[in-house]
Image (cartoon, coloured by chain):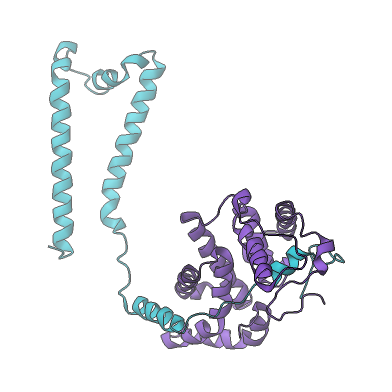
Chain colours: A cyan, B purple
């Protein structure tokens, strides 16, 4: 036994109690139960890798959109129109440069709705395509 | 009889290497040799973390599975036992974080009387109270205590298992022992001459 925490120090009662813990004998079925789980794992098919190739366009699209939103938000905030940031994004010259301001106000809800519909459709089409290719359906 | 971690380590290094090579070559059954050799130390280590037999076996089983999954990552130039104990300590630590067993230190069971003229059952109760008080320590102090005594009071091995510098482990160990001594003031060095029920190990040498 080593005692290198306090070289030369005598063992006190707490040391002696903690060092003399009763050993626990594993139950008789322990090895069998571990090996059963190991064999199950060995027999299981390897995990399906994440489809990075297929997911990459979507990830790029989402990252680009988020980046553009951040850029617009910062630009508008810096321009001193922080309180109207959201509407500013949609009515800014970059977003809709050739439409009059009055028409833009009317178009905003319609554009949001159209964007939501397109995203839903794209998501549905992509998931359908993926599941058909992997023969899950 | 349960082998001590040191004895198991010294006797089985060659066998472990052989079994690991066989497992990596596709012989799943060779892992049984590893489980047979290390079940005692791993279950006992888990027992010291939670003092619950059923849970100790579940945690040890999880540690073996983790070792099985990561067997290819073991580098034979390092000790298999050190690698295995590190995996086990990580598993046990995570388990205890998810489902803590600890009670506040001041709520840990109080021994009935100073260690003078105690009956066997009273001594056992007192020893168990001290061991349970370890579970009431904060995890950063509890684990060095558990591993230090599990590794037969070898700070270096405890530090390797935890992946911490020896100095850090020594400092935490000293703090933990202070907390325990405050909790059990009558178990001072002078009282150490009193009888301590043990399992036959002679810790006085």
Q: Nearer the viewer, residue B139 or A37?
A: B139
> In the displayed structure, would residue B130 be above or below residue A41?
above
Q: Is residue B92 left or right of residue A97?
A: right
Query: The C terminus of chain A lies in which quarter of the figure?
Result: bottom left
Identify the residue at image location x=73%, y=56%.
B177
Task: Measuring from the top left, give residue B149's x and y in whole percent.
Answer: 69, 68
Q: Nearer the viewer, residue A126 or B102?
A: B102
Task: Measuring from the top left, give residue B67's x and y in whole percent.
Answer: 49, 73
Task: Measuring from the top left, give residue A105's x and y in whole percent.
Answer: 17, 15
Residue B138 shows in this picture: yes
Residue B20 shows in this picture: no
Identify the residue at image location x=35%, y=24%.
A73
* Total residue callouts: 0
Residue A5, quarter of the rendered image: bottom right
Identify the residue at image location x=15%, y=41%.
A120
User: Going by the picture, which residue comes out furthest to the top?
Assistant: A102
Residue B51, quarter of the rendered image: bottom right
Query: The N terminus of chain A lies in which quarter of the figure?
Result: bottom right
Task: Measuring from the top left, give residue A38's x and y in whole percent.
Answer: 40, 78
Identify the residue at image location x=58%, y=49%.
B104
Q: Is residue B161 left or right of residue B73?
A: right
């Amino acid at each position: 036994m080593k005692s290198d925490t306090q070289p030369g120090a005598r063992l006190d009662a707490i040391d002696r109690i903690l060092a003399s813990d009763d050993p626990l004998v594993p139950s008789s079925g322990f090895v069998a139960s571990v090996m059963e789980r190991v064999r199950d794992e060995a027999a299981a098919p390897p995990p399906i890798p994440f489809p990075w190739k297929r997911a990459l366009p979507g990830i790029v699209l989402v990252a680009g959109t988020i980046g553009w939103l951040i850029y617009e938000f910062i630009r508008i905030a810096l321009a001193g129109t922080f309180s109207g940031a959201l509407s500013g994004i949609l009515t800014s010259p970059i977003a809709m440069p050739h439409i009059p301001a009055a028409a833009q106000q009317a178009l905003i809800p319609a554009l949001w709705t159209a964007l939501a519909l397109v995203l839903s459709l794209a998501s549905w089409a992509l998931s359908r395509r993926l599941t058909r290719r992997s023969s899950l359906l | 009889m349960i082998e001590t971690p040191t004895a198991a380590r010294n006797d089985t290094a060659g066998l472990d290497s052989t079994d690991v090579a066989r497992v990596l070559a596709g012989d799943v059954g060779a892992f049984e040799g590893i489980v047979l050799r290390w079940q005692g130390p791993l279950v006992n280590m888990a027992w010291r973390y939670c003092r619950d037999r059923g849970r100790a076996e579940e945690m040890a089983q999880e540690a073996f599975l983790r070792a099985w999954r990561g067997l290819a990552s073991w580098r034979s130039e390092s000790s298999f036992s050190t690698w295995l104990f590190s995996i086990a300590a990580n598993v046990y630590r995570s388990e205890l974080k998810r489902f803590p067993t600890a009670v506040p230190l001041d709520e840990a069971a109080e021994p009935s009387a100073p260690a003078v003229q105690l009956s066997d059952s009273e001594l056992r109760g007192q020893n168990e109270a001290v061991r349970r008080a370890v579970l009431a320590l904060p995890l950063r102090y509890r684990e060095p205590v558990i591993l230090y005594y599990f590794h037969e009071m070898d700070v270096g091995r405890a530090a390797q298992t935890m992946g911490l510098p020896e100095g850090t482990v020594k400092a935490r160990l000293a703090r933990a022992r202070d907390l325990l001594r405050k909790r059990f003031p009558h178990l001072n060095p002078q009282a150490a001459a009193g009888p301590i029920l043990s399992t036959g190990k002679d810790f006085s040498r």
